[in-house]
Amino acid sequence: MKPLSLYIHVPFCARKCAYCDFASYPGRETDWRRYFDEIATEIRLWSGETDFGLLSERYRVISMFIGGGTPTLVDAGYIGRVIDACRAIVPFEADAEITIEGNPGTLTPEKLAAFRRAGVNRLSLGAQSFDDGLLRSLGRIHTAAQIGQAVTMARDAGFDSINLDLMYALPGQGMNQWKDTLDAAIALGVEHISAYSLIVEPGTPMAARVASGTAIVPEDDAVNAMQREAIDRLLAAGYRRYEISNYARPGFECRHNLVYWNRGDYLGLGCAAHSLMGGRRFHNPDSLDEYLSGGRRLDEAVLTPQDEMEETLMLSTRTVRGLDLTAWARAFGTSFARGRERVLDRLENGGLIETGDGFLRLTMRGMEVQDAVVLELMGEM
């Protein structure tokens, strides 16, 4: 039986953040019940014989990620219903990782206890910053104090695997503010920290502020300095960097995200959910209304060997483990180095990559310019 990961998209939120371009919809509380009814319908469609075979006979679930939006905004009963429906169509590993994303401002002890009873065993909190001024500028609905309160409530509810999402390179954010945020996150003793550089997405309020000059994002050198500060501070506190933006205490790496980076099979349910199964990619519509009207499984495409090579290179080089050269030769029937000798020498001499133990890895400098390194290597394909 093949391992499978499940992604459930919950597109509801209390308020759209200034930087957010995800499929999320504030003010749609009246659609909650109908939306989860539609997810139940989608799950039933996958319960029978499909072109991937019968899921219950071909797959076992190793992880589930309930993302959004703000999944912890909705009634906990909806979350339990989705988990139970998925368990009815495909077997779960006994220790399957089941994560729910949450906003600290939406949590209560009762709700967290209900998530645990439903089987959720990992909590990912969108903390972003421990500076109240920066939180307000981002449009977050929580305060810095509520982050610590949420962690305490989660511990009391039995969560022993907690992630905090943090953001740097924010308009108006200085290095001292970033250090304070890192120190505050470390002090809470969580098992995992994700530290992401702000990406100004077109069409967002943040993009409008940057374009008008009312918000000024740091220069690249300052961004890289913040990333290096996170690496050093988190390593000193016992967090190992295992992917460009992710750090974990030993044994607490996010199994669900590792499936993405290793190109394992995953099935997405709900609006805007993407899937990779059996060498095919497809997705549900981003529009909530289109999904509620029955839109499913759009733009299905069978990946070519070239697609698979490019994805493997792009995703594996995000990880500290790097590209498995033996697995590459086995999958694609050729040595990765063949025809790339000169570019590999140039990148290695430039301190951007290193090879050893059968892997090609990006150095810390290389990870700072990962897109450019990957483009160089893809140019030889």
Image: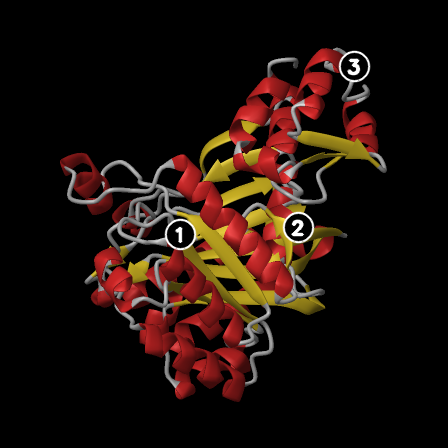
**Residue type, label 2:** Leu
Sequence-first tag of 3 and 1: 1
- Residue corresponding to mark 2: 54
At 56% across and 79% down in the image, what residue appears?
159
- Left or right? Give the position of 83 relative to 252: left
- Residue corresponding to mark 1: 168
Residue nearest the observer in this picture, 203 or 376: 376
Residue nearest the observer in this picture, 87 or 257: 257
Residue 54 position in % (x across, y down): 66, 50
**Res 16 visible:** no
At 21% across and 67% down in the image, what residue appears?
30
Asked whether disc 3 touches disc 1, contact meaning CB atoms under 8 Å apart, the reply is: no
Between marks 3 and 2 in the image, the one whose residue lies nearer the viewer: 3
**Label 3 secondary element:** loop
Residue 59 position in % (x across, y down): 70, 53
Q: Is residue 14 above or below residue 196?
A: below
Q: Quadrant of the C terminus?
A: top right
At 16% across and 38% down in the image, what residue appears?
213
At 71% across and 25% down in the image, what residue appears?
348
Mark 3–mark 1 distance (CA, rounded to whole Å): 39 Å
**Label 2 Cα crowd, 10 Å radius (few <14 / some 14-19 / many 20+):** some
Sequence-first tag of 1 and 2: 2
Asked whether disc 3 touches disc 2, contact meaning CB atoms under 8 Å apart, the reply is: no
**Residue type, label 3:** Arg
